[in-house]
Amino acid sequence: MSFSPTDHSNPNPNSIFFPENPDPMADFELSDYLMLDAGVFEDDTSEKGMGVANESATPKHSNMQKNNGVFCFSFSLLSCLKICRSCKSGEKKNKLGLGHRIAFRMKSEIEAMDDGYKWRKYGKKSVKNSPSPRNYYKCVSGGCNVKKRIERDRDDKSYVITTYEGVHNHESPYTSYCNQMPLMAPNACISQSSPFSSSFST
DNA sequence: CGGCTTTGACCTGCGC
DNA sequence: GCGCAGGTCAAAGCCG
């Protein structure tokens, strides 16, 4: 299944589309993700505050599974944020009082990835020692004060660093959309909608 | 005309 | 207290 920009059944016209590309993930590489306030994996080899999806890692959540030696994340960023909510981190909050924070570093030419939620840009700021500006977004859903920052990696501009703050208090439009497709493979929709749902070779 | 982005100004925290 | 840097606000402009 693949959406096209003219496919009006796609609930989010801003989605990233993978046309008839034999390898839709060819241009995308999720290199790191940092659980700044909590860990995703219960893995003895994990660094503090960072999950590592290696062979010995034990999936802490049902969203993650091993398939033919490959760890497959069936969650996208949006579901990952929900995972954060369930983590036992003591509900530490940042200075903004938004609670959990999670950062992703990924190789991408596109900065504004579609993660299923709708965002409104409210600021842009140049950062010291960084040639690329930082963009600020807020979730536009009423009552949801989740924010995200997007900036280019100062060391390697081919990488984009996305930082999420807070937890959505509503379901993603995309999640709702996927839930209405019982015949679809569980990972298929997310894989098409969000490149964040990736696979790690182990 | 409504929604979204841009951008300069303003606010706040922190180090000296 | 002062200056700097990061974060946010809000008016103006753009676009469909």
Image: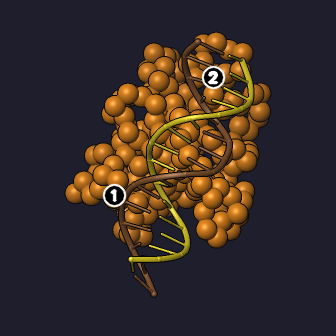
Chain colours: A orange, B brown, C yellow
Tell which of A63 and A161 is nearer to you.
A161
Mark 2: which amino acid?
Pro
Q: Is residue A144 left or right of residue A27?
A: left
Please tell me which of labels 1 and 2 falls first in the chain. Answer: 2
Q: Which residue is mark 2?
A: A13
Question: Which quadrant is home to the C terminus of chain A?
Answer: bottom right
Tell which of A54 and A189 is nearer to you.
A189
Up/down of A117 relative to A135, above or below: above
Residue at 42% x, 70% y: name it: A47
Residue C7: give x, y in percent of width and height: 46, 54
Q: Is residue A194 left or right of residue A76?
A: right
Mark 1: which amino acid?
Asn
Q: Is residue A55 left or right of residue A201?
A: left
Up/down of A65 relative to A118, above or below: below
Is the Cβ of the residue at disc 1 closer than 8 Å to that at disc 2?
no
CA distance separating discs 1 and 2: 33 Å
Residue at 36% x, 42% y: name it: A167
Residue at 45% x, 15% y: name it: A180
Q: Which residue is mark 1?
A: A94
Up/down of A1 relative to A111, above or below: above
Residue A186 visible, this orientation: no
- Label 1 environment density (alpha carbons within 10 Å; few <14, some 14–19, many ≥20): few
